[in-house]
Image (cartoon, grey):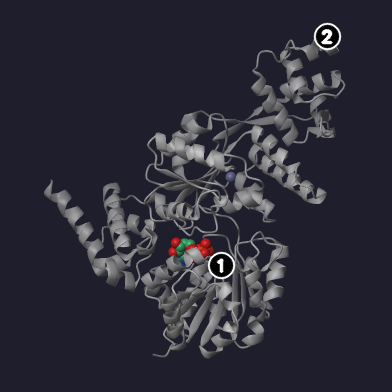
């Protein structure tokens, strides 16, 4: 059968993937690949990168070779491609020699549309050259930042890819990454030797994610409350240490919530088994250190919780980015406490290299400001990546939806700073708070600070509140911390403005729990129709069970069969015919052939059962 590059890409999009339209940039990328041009695409997680090479792979003569470092995901990726009817196989070190040989035989026989390849294979002997025996339509380099030593995920094996354009001067190369920094991007272009590539840099905005920050008080109780509202949803809870991961997982399990731990200290088999249980919808919650990341491709992660402060904005973005790849609304919750800042600073002080230490510190404070300052979270996050967000109100963060409010705290700030000035700006927060609250301590007596005019001026408020005021003054740079290892507080120029009454000072306050719950169940704003769909919850549950049964029979994760959105649409539109079933998002010809009968049967039985029951 001959293929033609003039084929109707939109038609293939519908027939193979069951999608009614391209996502942003997908169309142009597909077109460039079909025109045999090199491509360099920077797109966020969930942007839909795989379609950008899978669709041309169907339309072009020969085999698309996909290089990917994610060996543990390769089988799932190939299963997902096959479920859409694509002829796909993979070659990596995890498989038996026989299976590998079969994949290569299929490649050389010209039977494959897609071959997924681990980079360490390319580094073996003259494997790269031997690919010349096959007809390669183009190379797709996934996670292309792995070639850069500046990136967070450098893989030496990726350097072999520098030879691609020399060995295959006539074969186009399409590189994809979700890493945004300019330095890494330059490095990728150069190391791969891309030839006048068609470049795309997508927005890093993830419109379906809702961002929320709450003060961390009793984390366990907060987590329990959060999860109780989300029964049956998949999510990840990030914690900093192995110990806290274990503790949180054990707590949730005691409370009857199925949760598994994941961290580098677990036996590899246990780790793999826990990840697999999550991936296969057997356990909804994973409590993990940030070691849990690269290996997950699960599209229906409905929430990501940070139980501790992330190291920096980049980490926060990457980790929250694992939520909602399927485009459905998902929630990102951060529990923030100043105590965490002190803990992180403790580790940062141990960094030997001075420049590295300063960078780590600067990035941490940026993260703190994100959590504390009254500015749209989305805007702040995108600003960090050099992107300006055009909307006044994003509609999908706690600041924009008014789930936090600002209160004027100018007077309290003045009390604090006055106490600082009157005690000579020589003390840290603990002592300043003692003075403000009128505490009777040895230190207060030693320095005669009970004589200071502001002594006890804030006795009507708990110490915790004054700590919060000082933290906010620090975050808003009205105060600074000077001196190491015994830091004391000083008033900055900005602080003087507040003290003299020229400038005001505001802090954030979370609204009542009721308001928060509302925000949480509302999910993200814009971007997706998923949640607004009025669907039959009972049928949805039934279809999920059917999906799980089929997935188990076929030994694949449930999302390979159908995404959540497809099931919700089925439970809303109740298709009765093959034609109607094809209209569902994510149902292409192959999935109709494979699963149509069973799902249509399930829907019919449910409907019949309901009408029989009266
Ligand atoms: P990335 O690799 O960029 O993180 P994926 O390729 O895994 O993203 O795609 C993310 C999700 O979006 C998948 O569930 C995929 O089926 C879905 N998707 C991709 N393109 C489209 C589209 N044009 N319409 C609807 N859903 C899409
Ligand atoms: Zn916002």
* Nearer-the-camera pick, 499 or 17: 17
Residue 538: x percent and y percent? Answer: 27, 47
Check disc 1 and report its element: helix, strand or loop. loop
* Nearer-the-camera pick, 278 or 43: 278
Above or below, 167 against 519 in this view is: below
Q: Name the residue beneath numbered marker 2.
A: 451
Tell me where residue 349 sits by quadrant.
Answer: top right
As drawn, the residue found furthest toward the right would be 424
Give the side of residue 255 with respect to residue 545, left or right.
Answer: right
Query: Does the beta carbon at disc 1 come under 8 Å from ligand 1?
Result: no
Check disc 2 and report its element: helix, strand or loop. helix
Q: Earlier in the sequence, mark 2 or mark 1?
A: 1
Question: Which residue occupies 51% across, 88% down?
Answer: 135
Above or below, 419 against 156 in this view is: above
Tell me where residue 460 sits by quadrant.
Answer: top right
Q: Quadrant of the N terminus?
A: bottom left
Residue 69, numbered label: 1
Question: Which residue occupies 38% across, 69% down?
Answer: 18
Give the side of residue 575 with respect to residue 202, left or right.
Answer: left
Question: Which residue occupies 56% across, 67% down?
Answer: 69
Disc 2 from disc 1: Cα separation: 66 Å
């Amino acid at each position: 059968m001959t293929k033609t590059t003039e084929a109707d890409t939109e038609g293939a999009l519908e027939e193979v993937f069951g999608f009614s339209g391209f996502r942003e940039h997908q169309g142009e990328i597909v077109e460039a690949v079909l025109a045999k041009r090199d491509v360099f695409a920077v797109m966020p997680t969930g942007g839909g990168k795989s379609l950008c090479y899978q669709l041309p792979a169907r339309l072009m003569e020969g085999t698309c070779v996909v290089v990917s470092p994610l060996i543990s995901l390769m089988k799932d990726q190939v299963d997902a491609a096959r479920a859409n009817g694509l002829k796909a196989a993979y070659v990596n070190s995890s498989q038996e020699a026989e299976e590998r040989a079969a994949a290569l035989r299929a490649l050389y026989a010209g039977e494959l549309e897609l071959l997924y390849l681990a980079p360490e294979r390319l580094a073996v002997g003259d494997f790269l050259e031997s690919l010349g025996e096959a007809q390669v339509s183009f190379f797709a380099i996934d996670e292309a930042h792995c070639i850069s030593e500046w990136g967070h995920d450098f893989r030496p094996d990726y350097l072999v890819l520098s030879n691609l354009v020399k060995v295959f001067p006539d074969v186009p190369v399409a590189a994809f990454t979700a890493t945004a920094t300019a330095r890494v991007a330059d490095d990728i272009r150069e190391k791969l030797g891309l030839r006048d590539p068609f470049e795309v840099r997508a927005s890093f905005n993830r419109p379906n994610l809702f961002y929320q920050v709450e003060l961390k008080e009793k984390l366990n109780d907060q987590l329990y409350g959060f999860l109780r509202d989300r029964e049956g949803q998949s999510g990840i809870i990030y914690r900093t240490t192995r110990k806290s991961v274990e503790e949180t997982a054990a707590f949730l399990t005691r409370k009857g919530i199925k949760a598994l731990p994941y961290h580098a200290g677990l036996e590899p088999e246990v780790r793999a088994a826990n990840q697999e249980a999550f991936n296969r919808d057997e356990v909804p919650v994973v409590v993990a250190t940030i070691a849990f990341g690269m290996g997950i491709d699960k599209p229906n992660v409905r929430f990501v919780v940070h139980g501790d402060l992330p190291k920096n904005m980049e980490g926060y973005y990457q980790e929250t980015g694992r939520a909602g790849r399927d485009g459905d609304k998902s929630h990102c919750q951060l529990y923030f406490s100043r105590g965490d800042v002190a803990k992180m600073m403790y580790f940062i002080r141990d960094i030997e290299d001075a420049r590295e230490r300063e960078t780590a510190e600067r990035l941490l404070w940026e993260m703190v400001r994100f959590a504390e300052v009254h500015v749209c979270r989305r805007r702040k996050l995108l600003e960090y990546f050099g992107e300006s967000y055009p909307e006044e109100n994003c509609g999908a963060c706690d600041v924009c939806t008014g789930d936090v409010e600002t209160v004027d705290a100018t007077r309290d700030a003045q009390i604090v700073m006055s106490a600082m000035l009157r005690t000579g700006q020589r003390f840290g927060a603990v002592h300043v708070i003692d003075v403000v609250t009128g505490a009777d301590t040895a230190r207060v007596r030693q320095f005669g600070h009970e004589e200071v005019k502001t002594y006890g001026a804030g006795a009507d408020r708990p110490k915790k509140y004054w700590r919060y005021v000082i933290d906010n003054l620090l975050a808003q740079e009205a105060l600074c911390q000077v001196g190491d290892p015994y830091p004391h507080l000083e008033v900055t120029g900005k602080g003087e403005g507040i003290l003299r009454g020229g400038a005001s000072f505001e802090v954030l306050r979370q609204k009542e729990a009721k308001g928060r719950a509302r925000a949480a169940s509302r999910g993200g704003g814009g971007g997706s129709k998923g949640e607004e769909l009025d669907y039959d919850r009972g049928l949805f549950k039934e279809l999920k069970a059917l999906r799980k049964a089929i997935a188990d029979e076929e030994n694949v994760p449930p999302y390979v069969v159908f995404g959540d959105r497809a099931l919700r649409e089925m439970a809303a539109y109740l298709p009765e015919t093959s034609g109607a079933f094809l209209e569902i998002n994510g149902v292409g010809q192959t999935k109709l052939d494979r699963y149509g009968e069973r799902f249509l049967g399930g829907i019919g039985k449910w409907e019949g059962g309901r009408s029989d029951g009266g």
